Image (tube, grey):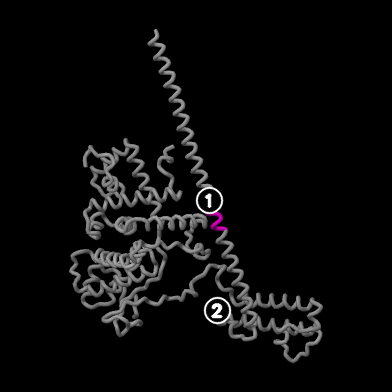
Amino acid sequence: MGRTRTDLSPRMTATDEELVARSQGGDLESFNELIVRWERPIYALAYRVIGREEDARDVCQDTFLRAYRALPGFKGQAKFSSWLYRIALNLCRDWIRRQRRAPVSQMPEDIDAAELAAATEPTESIEDLVARRELSAIVEQAMAGLSEEQRTAIILKEYHGMTFQEIADLQGCPLSTVKTRLYQGLSQLRRQLERQGQMVPEVVKRV
Amino acid sequence: MSDTFACVDPGALVSYLYDECAADEREAIARHLALCVACASEVEGLRSTRQAIATWAPPAVDLGLQITRKDQAEVPTLPGAVLAFKRPAQEPAARALPWWKAPLPAWAQVAAAVLIFGAGLSVGLLRPDARSSQAPAPQAAVQPTTPVVAGPSKADLVQLEQTLRGEMAQLARTNVAAPAPTPVAARSGDDAIMQRVQALITQSEERQRIEFTERSVRQASAYEAQRRADFESVRATFGQTGAEVRQQRQAIDEINRYLVRVNQQR
């Protein structure tokens, strides 16, 4: 499927809603532009919710396939991205039920020197990078210990910048419940990180 | 929300934490936090937690999803339309590698091959038993018609040197004219040497990688141990300070009680 710069430019500047309208009119490339925009956030959401790289890919792929098939029925009652997130979250929930287990935290294998070097920021030393990766792995494990609702609320808030109301709509619960889930989830993560020695308890900081 | 902000209201703290509250509510909470150490500590702890969880990044993947029509699909398994992963632009093996993992340029591979070949030849010549039994295989390959009985003569070595120099010059010319990634691959005579060199390089890379990884992990462990020791030290200091304060308070209480008793006796 050949793409040229000239036929991409108008699509790249179009809004999601415009691309949706064109896709509904049969313009496949417009839908592919929507995929380009949203595949990484949807993959990141799926990975963080279910914790498996390959399965997250499948969920991401399924999300766009379902969205494409359901596109004729999409009336714009919600933002396209919210609609996409809803599909993805439903698929994640299905996956978790199918697996009948908590999300698995994929611990990184042995630290690969090549990967480390490639991932180093220009101002970041290898030691900093190792520490950051270690913390990232600990956070991933701690997140896997939360309930599905708490984890999803935190993921949508922290990594996708949603408002309390957007999360409430996606999770189908009152706004106050979202706040409670965030508070309890963050508190549990905090305790877990303090136990792992990743955070100094506030009582010690005040000394 | 008014000035009568209730202490330990998780919903309000979360709203404040994410800055998702009305201005007057925010001000009321801020005023409360300035006075209430417990709530301030709670918000600070949650803020630190947010900073920590920001480090969690999903693995980088090349998704390249693309909807294609059924008749254009590379993987025609689904009716109507097919969602297929685009093939990455580069095969994984061809990705940009760090300098110590990148393949050597052709001239360097040839130079390494010649070096190893020369070293092997020298060892072979210096060993007394090598002179009588068998000649080095590459020598035979270069000069198959030369009878080999008591090792190569000086003339053989000069000829070998010329041959190698000629091959190197030819390879260098080939490399300049068309910088193919592996120009030596076409030369079947050098294949065995090249494979050996490649194997040595691979082993060396692997060893370096393992050593580097071990060093990184050791440093990380040492850093973690030091951090924990510092943490324990701070905690111990805190505990000690608390005990001293308690002792001093008891002593003051004793003095107070004594003064009260003295006053009462008067």
Q: Is residue B216 visible?
A: yes
Q: Secondary structure at mark 2?
A: loop
Quadrant assignment for the C terminus of chain B: top left
Q: Is residue A123 visible?
A: no
Q: Nearer the viewer, residue B148 or A182?
A: A182
- Parent chain of label 1: B
Q: Nearer the viewer, residue A144 or B234?
A: A144
Q: Residue B63 is drawn in which quadrant? A: bottom left
Q: Nearer the viewer, residue B163 or A182?
A: A182
Outermost residue toward the front? Answer: A100
Quadrant assignment for the N terminus of chain B: top left
Q: In screen coordinates, is B88 left or right of B228?
A: left
Indicate which label's residue lies in the foreground, 1 or 2: 1
Q: Main secondary structure of the magenta part?
A: helix
Q: In screen coordinates, is A15 left or right of B254?
A: left
Is B175 inside the magenta-drawn segment?
no
The residue type indicated by label 1 comes to Tyr
What span is in magenta? B215-224
- Parent chain of label 2: B
Image: B122 above or below A196: below
Q: Position of residue B10 (x, y in %)?
A: 28, 45
Image: B5 above or below A150: above
Residue bearing mark 2: B181
Q: Nearer the viewer, residue B9 or B63?
A: B9
Image: A64 above or below B166: above
Mark 1 closeness class: few <14, some 14–19, many ≥20 residues within 10 Å: some
Query: Who's the residue at 48% across and 59% down the image?
Result: A122
Is B222 inside the magenta-drawn segment?
yes
Q: Position of residue A183 (x, y in %)?
A: 31, 49
Residue bearing mark 1: B223
Q: Residue B134 is drawn in which quadrant? A: bottom right
